[in-house]
Image (cartoon, rainbow, N blue to C red):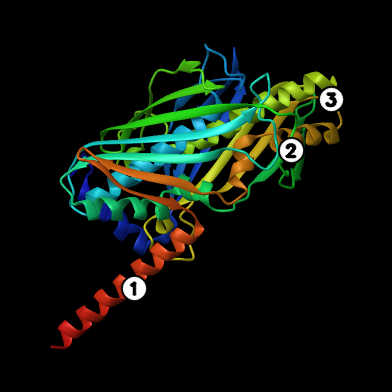
Amino acid sequence: MRNGLDISGASELVHEIGDKPAEAVIDFHASAVPGLSGAEVSIRTAHHGTQRMARSFRIPFTQDSARRLGGLSSYEAAVAALGACVLITHVHGYSARGVTITSLRVTVTAAVEVDAHGRWTGGETALHDLRYLVEADCDGSADSVREVSRFVTCFSPNHRAFLDEGSYRLAAVAVRPDGTPDAAELDRADPAPAGANGTRLELTAELTWEYGVQATATTTFAPGGELCRERPALVVDQSKQMLGLDRGPNPQELLLAAVSADLTHQVRALAARRGIPLDGVEVESSGRLDIRGMLNVSADIPARFHNLRFAVRAETEAPLADLTGLVREAASRNVVLATLVRANSVRVDLRSPAGPLDGFTSDAGQVTEFLAEVARKQAATAAGNALTGRR
């Protein structure tokens, strides 16, 4: 054990996926339905290769109106999902290098422009000004801390989903009175055009390492620079198959929840404004993680969280075209989806108890450069081993 991780278990997992690549693929699922103050998201059973992973968590969401009371907003969940994934990948990186952690904290800050109702104003700037502050107290050298953080920016699945230009799939399902589904697959929606000038909403998620791959996330938002609310801590954890303790949703599930909750809010609000009757609204979401990409087994396998799909199901007698229009527009107004479909950059600052260590910008160029450096080191090591073997 190191840092609460079963190192032998991790080694067995790596060997297993080497022999059986299908076991490296994990499909996560969530569903959102209307709740008392917005939406309620249920984390569903995941599939890890041929195994089913029981996942049963519920997260109450408030509408993105920056209410002082209520559940989590999708904005807060998105930055928490980023920070949690970055933190957990740091834990794996330190543990693989034999570094013992005393404490680890990742603070994510971001901004979004919102209207008077707290809704994203649209346009080219979705979530922006993303920054990570990584504070590590460990027995590793300063160079090892720097190397781990650069490794994380290449292989943290949620970070890469935000960093890379991505995509997603949409579906609309109208359930008729006799129970018959009327479905349509939709193209990805372009982000909504920019509206009137909005207010800058400052978002903060503070992730604190607890044990193994478990962390607590505390989120705050500050419209116009005035602190509005600090939400009680949310536990983020992995399944037991992923070396966790099953005490909370994992970062990928939290990201799905953020998108699904917002789609639920938007579809209902748009339907009400247009007089389209909808009952039993539910947003089903899924996404895929391939551990081989996360572990740099093959450059052809994406490290990022991918294969994102969102299906909006509703009981209605309205024409299917009406529902597809609502779904497409709701997706175009979803700030997380608008962020995921473009390439982004993140400022990363590192700190130890002795003070600042380093700072760099994580973007596509930084990832390419670091991966090339890793490949050169691996090639040099392989050549050295071959030479030693010949002697």
Quarter of the image for residue 257 reads: top right
Mark 3 belongs to which amino acid? Answer: Glu
Residue occupied by mark 3: 317
- The dot on residue 109 is none
- The dot on residue 376 is 1
Mark 1 belongs to which amino acid? Answer: Arg
Q: Nearer the viewer, mark 1 or mark 3?
A: 1
From the viewer's perspective, is 167 left or right of 272?
A: left
Q: Is residue 268 above or below residue 113?
A: above
Q: Position of residue 142 (x, y in %)?
A: 22, 51
Residue occupied by mark 2: 192
Mark 2 belongs to which amino acid? Answer: Ala
Quarter of the image for residue 280 reads: top right
Q: Residue at x 84, y 22 (%)?
A: 274
Distance of mark 1 from mark 2, alpha carbons? 43 Å
For marks 1 and 2 on the same chain, the one whose residue lies earlier in the sequence? 2
Q: Residue at x 52, y 40 (%)?
A: 129
Q: Residue at x 63, y 35 (%)?
A: 335
From the viewer's perspective, is 224 left or right of 194?
A: left
